[in-house]
Amino acid sequence: MSNEKQAVTDERDSKSSKFRGYRVPLLRFQVNDVCHDGATVVFGAGLNFHELLTDAVIGVLSALYTPETAPTHVRSVTLILRPMDGVAYTTGMDIDDDHKEIHFSTNYMAGVHERSHGTQDKEEILGVIRHEMVHCFQYNAMGTANGGLIEGIADWVRYKAGFIPPHWRDGTAEHWDQGYQNTAYFLLWLEKQYGLATVPRINAWMKKRQYSDELWIELFGEKPEALFRKYKKTFEGSPGGGIQIPTHRDTLEASLSPPSPPAVSPSASVPGNDMADDQSYVEVTKPKQDTDKANDRTVSFFQISEMRLLARDRLFKLTFDGDEDGGAALFFNKFDGLIEVLDPKMTDKERKLLLVTALRKKAADFLSRADPHGRASYDEIRHRFQIAM
Ligand SMILES: [Zn+2]
């Protein structure tokens, strides 16, 4: 490295990597197809990406931490704009933990632009990136956290930042861990009862512990279901059952109904061995529940896509060599949890195939001894591992 280049790097480290006491990691921006319609939308939104990404990091860190408690292990965050299904997802949550990648769909942004006639572009970019940035820095109970809670915290931060999509409604959730804005509104209510440190405390609890109801009992004295019933009670008898007074932004709601299945054009392939481009596992056309309300369909579409993309990514990176902390029990807990999100109806054969690709060293040797002819069922194999490791 030349002296001149070194000097520039030093300046950046000393002058611009700390803001308001929070350390900002290296921020990178990668565009995989600059000619894509959605990339044009993002470039045309009038955003300064240095400010946008720095604000997102500082916004997330200051929402969840103090400068003293903020995690410092994240060395880089890369925003990758690329054609893909779904909206966005973040990788590197517990493997490659130092380097995070936010994958953001240009197909999705092209759709937002079309449906909102350009009026929601900027807000949506800011909101999606703020949400994903939370995943870069939040704790997840060592990979065991309730997925709805993780997504709820991300949208709680997004709400606090003021990037509130027109279809969000308080009081419509049916379960506390429905995720996204549903859980975010529950967290906002909880915050009103227990103070501004509520969500930071929930996040901090998940730093070094495995997830359980103990979190809620320790912090709030009750199980989440009981707290959620109290929250729901506040909407009883109110006209519209918690539906907020319409704002001028609601006129957009109809036009933000479910995105059509993203068309993956031949030009959408991305260089490199990016397995996330494999479309096979991701359901994009059929939302989980049928419902009359267009906005609910939109919400379940987002939830399914993001959680599945993330689950697939994490499943591909999950390995077990037989010597990890937590042993086979923790590994299978994670493995089964990811499959549950990805495809609960996965066949025994497919499960075994994925398991084989995850095993290393001692664990791989054990499998070849425990099931030499490949005839044992997945459940039998798991049982043998849990006894042995
Ligand atoms: Zn998320």
Image: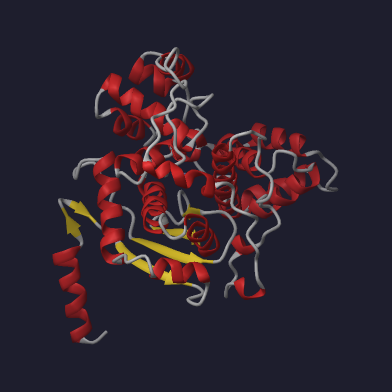
Q: Is residue 49 above or below residue 131?
A: below
336 and 362: which is toward the camera: 336
Residue at screen point 55% across, 50% down: 310
Q: Is residue 347 above or below residue 245?
A: below
Residue at screen point 43% across, 20% down: 214
Total marks shown come to 0
Q: Is residue 143 left or right of residue 58?
A: right
Question: What kind of colouring is applied to the model shown?
Answer: secondary structure
Q: Position of residue 99 (x, y in %)?
A: 40, 60
- Using the rendered view, name the quadrant where residue 14 is placed: bottom left
Q: Position of residue 276 (x, y in %)?
A: 59, 60
Looking at the rendered image, the quarter that the C terminus falls into is: top right
Residue at screen point 61% across, 51% down: 312
- Using the rendered view, name the quadrant where residue 43 is placed: bottom left
32 and 213: which is toward the camera: 32
Q: Position of residue 129 (x, y in %)?
A: 39, 54
Looking at the rendered image, the quarter that the N terminus falls into is: bottom left
- Using the rendered view, name the quadrant where residue 299 is placed: top right
Q: Is residue 10 left or right of residue 281?
A: left
Q: Is residue 357 above or below residue 145?
A: below
Q: Is residue 321 visible?
A: no
Residue at screen point 67% across, 37% down: 385
Q: Position of residue 388 (x, y in %)?
A: 65, 35
Q: Is residue 283 visible?
A: yes
